[in-house]
Image (tube, grey):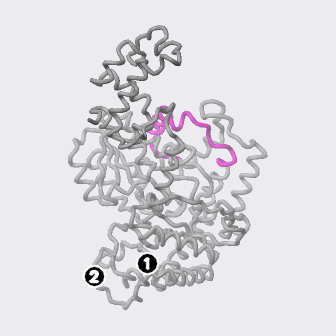
Amino acid sequence: MPCPFISRLPSTYVRNYAGNLLKTYAEHCPYASQVVVGSSFTGSSAPTGGVGGSTNKGQEGSSIHTQARDGARSAVRPVLQADVIQETTGFGYESFFQAEIKKKKEDHSYRIFKKVNRTAATFPYAREYSRGEKDITVWCSNDYLGMSAHPAVKNAVHQAIEKYGAGAGGTRNISGNSTVHEELERELADLHSKEAGLVFTSCYVANDTTLFTLARQLPGCQIFSDAGNHASMIQGIRNSGVPKHIFKHNNPEDLERNLRKVDKAIPKIVAFETVHSMTGAICPLEEMCDIAHEYGALTFVDEVHAVGLYGAEGAGVGQRDGAEDKIDIISGTMGKAFGNIGGYIAGSSGLIDVVRSYGAGFIFTTSLPPTVLCGALESIRVLRSEEGRELRARHQCNVAYLRTKLQEAGVSVEHTPSHILPVHVGDPLVCSALSDELMKYGHYVQAINFPTVPRGQEKLRIAPTPHHTFEMMDRFTADLKEIWVNLGLKLNPVSSGVCAGSCTYCSKPDLFARLTAREACGIPNCPQIESIAAAA
């Protein structure tokens, strides 16, 4: 009969840990326990010449160790259906790793990085090295305004390396804090009209550390998390171990339904994003903040894909909508529109000091180097100026132009009110094929597959910059349409100018430019959407 202990375990686990399992279960086994009494299996010392000492070759066949091993193997064998169990000295790490990667390849979620060297002098052009060497145009960068190549930013970095050297020297507490760190934090606080700011090595670390730290410090805290939140926020919430409530993406009504379940006196954090990185949706910020505050919650708002791009000084959607004062904690990045690297939060001085004092992700890591700090500081100042406003205007103009061209071409560009233009594909193989074919035509657009997006929502994510010309966008649209047809994908019909349905965009067109992408129209090339986009 199968072993009643080992048969409950997965066969792979049994195979990998056979030796240890025999020792662990022997003393409980009706068969093996009769032959292991006094042996090393039970932890007692073995007789001289037995298991615990030197065993002569002639004695080995009748030793207690051999009897127990053979008996236990007999009990396990029916579970494995063959002589597949072998005594091992450890876990089969490499075979496990290979099996995990095989699964990724089989479900088409395995990532192959493109080898792309961007050229600072000719942004958004680059050279691609995955299949030889080729000149390409980048259409998917998060360097939304090309600030990484801005002359003033590059000059600030050059001066910093000559003045301060390459590295930071340590953690903020031990030799790694400088006047430049504190100057940047003051600039960020002022940008967002907050009392204080705190710089992290990335915004992933900023989100993870801040949510974890606040959730653990606030007594009895509960977190309300948008279903579309970024992995960094999810990680911090999960690791905190506090009760969490997931509400529908960008849905104030569902947020309120969840908040009603918890006493107002209990500390709460409502966490969500303004611009969603993959769908391009923009949340109804003011409405969600008002609901959160009505039920006694703090608002944690991720503006990573909005800072630099929206508002009079590039402070994000909060500044654009006049709702900055309703955001208790804002998180942002210096690695996207600001063209550098690193993340940050801004909020009240007391809140920031708690995260600074208790946040392990801030405390126990080497701080950002002066080159990054000076580059980011200069970029922020440029984007707060008239030059920044002009860049943002050109950016929005190009986004509207390319959106309209893609709609006219009939490819399935999703309607969004932001600068992100997702083209829905819905199949990982086809999505990757589109990306590969576009590269042959000289266009780099990364295929976005699971787990970045849910299965069935595979897409191309297009992000035009102020530096893409109309001619470049016309050529890109024509090439994408040609590849689209060659791969057997259907084109959407050209709009007839008559809307066959009703949606939020049709009933509230004035909200298009400012608020929500909660509800997709569902009508291919909706005339209402087209007319608004064309006028933008």
Inspect this view and state whether residue 38 appears: yes
Q: Secondary structure at mark 1?
A: loop
Region rendered in magenta: 344-373
Give the amino acid type for the residue marked by disc 2 in the picture. Gly
Q: Residue furthest bottom?
A: 496
* Residue 326: assigned label: none
Q: Is residue 19 above or below residue 458?
A: above
Residue appearing at x 55%, y 47% in the figure: 202
| C-beta proximity under 8 Å, tags 2 and 1 | no
Residue occupying image coordinates x 62% and y 58%: 339
Which residue is outermost to the front?
58
Look at the magenta stretch and give its main secondary structure: helix
Give percent across and percent down for residue 86. 46, 35
- Residue 27: percent from left, percent from top: 33, 21
| Secondary structure found at label 2 | loop
* Residue shown at the point (37%, 85%) measured from the top left: 527
- The residue wearing badge 1 is 412
Residue nearer the viewer, 183 or 149: 149
Vertical side of 132 occupied by 220: above or below: above
Residue hosting label 2: 501
Label 1 environment density (alpha carbons within 10 Å; few <14, some 14–19, many ≥20): many
- Answer yes or no: is residue 384 visible: no
Q: Quadrant of residue 84?
A: top left
Residue 512 coordinates in the image, percent (x, y): 39, 73
